[in-house]
Image (spheres, rainbow, N blue to C red):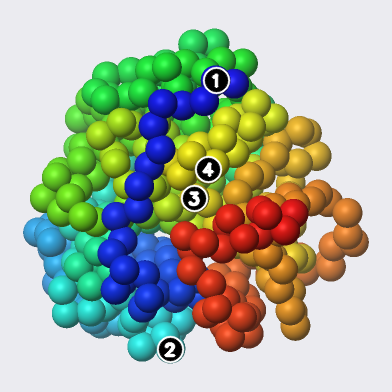
Amino acid sequence: FPEPKRLRTHSCNLNQATMRNLYDDIDAMLEVTDLVYAMADLGKVKKDDAKVGALIDSGFLDSLPKTSKEVVQWAVKNKEVMGNADNSKSYLEDILARDQKQASADATLEVFDDDFAYADEDSEVVYGIGKNPDMKRITVVFRGSTTSADWEHNCKCSSEELEEGFMELLEGIPSVNAELASEFKDVRLHTGFSKYLFKNCGKNAEGVECEKPKFHQIVDHVRRLLEENPDYELWFTGHSLGGALAVLAASAAALLDDIKTTVKLVSFAAPQVGKENYVKIMDRLESTKALIHIRVTNCDDLVPQLNGVIGYEHFGLHLNLYKNRHALSYDQGGMSRPWPWNALNRHHMKTHLARLTLAKSDLEKYDIDTVCAKIKGEN
């Protein structure tokens, strides 16, 4: 591949870099991922005529921004009416146990979109966009698998070839690096995941046809927030299906010339989204600092490896969490171990939190901007 013409710079200043470490950054992404699950569940309650009457302040999310503390407090008030009660309460418990690190006085939820989450089962995308002035970051977070439609898309192992490269998925978005995006020719992406983000998302709850695919909508929001906050970083995160969507969205965002900062991505338990050529190009984006990916998994979680059986691959720095230890490596591995009968239990966010906490003292020694170079050198 020819080398891309630009090298991204980091927007984080020296004072911020000395205050932040790899553990804090990953834990912050885990927290907002917990929160989007709870918010999505409450959004589903709001759309249920039989349940909405029990929802306290049902119009809370209709007017944004809201502070993250207000969002958490609203979710706690309504925990008894959550449709997916057991898991959603667990997510809230995890947030509260971490003392709401991201719920600083100035952190805000700027965008929350579940308009198409339940009207059309082929458009199950729920995401939020937050702004944190303390960390100087904009974060896009995707909700993970909760519905049968989500798991159906997870299990759609078919792939589609991008004959014209990534340009065909990003049509209509200004400032795409056409030279780089066109190099995605002969790249194969997971059909279900790419459909979620890059295809027209159908009709909303009122039956109105959506004019833009989800990714295009996200880019509009991100551009506005970065224009208002030019010294902020851009982060993507999500768990399970949400992790897969975060990987694809971050990959596409890294191709936009007007996003000057390194796109940072932390995925949790994400399935593979692309095949060999896609991974090669992502590795190159990482080498030019257009993209940094920290891929977090539990070692005995089946979901992140399922697609590997048919040729899909991971990329990025892999933080593999074991019961009593952890490993950082660029070795993406494969399905080489016997899986416990309850392997899907290892997929839960609570297990990620418990194992991440055990790794805290070691992960605090690193920061995200240097650990990738260090581990890559050792590998």
Secondary structure under the numbered disc 1 in the rendered image: loop
Q: Which mark is residue 292?
A: 3
Say which residue label 1 marks: 2
- Residue at left offset 61%, top offset 80%: 362
Give the Cα distance between marks 3 and 1.
20 Å
Q: Earlier in the sequence, mark 4 or mark 1?
A: 1
Q: Eyeballing the image, is 273 above or below 199?
A: below
Judged left or right of residue 62, residue 26 is: right
Q: Is residue 251 left or right of residue 261?
A: right
Query: Marks 2 and 3, how far apart in space?
Result: 28 Å
- Mark 3 or 1, closer to the camera: 1
Task: Identify residue for label 4.
Answer: 286
Kindly identify which residue carries mark 2: 97
Sequence-wise, the earlier of marks 1 and 2 is: 1
Q: Is residue 309 visible?
A: yes
Density class for disc 3 (Cα within 10 Å; few <14, some 14-19, many ≥20) is many
> Is the residue marked by circle 2 packed among few (<14), some (14-19), or many (20+) residues within 10 Å?
few
Residue 28 x %, y %: 40, 71
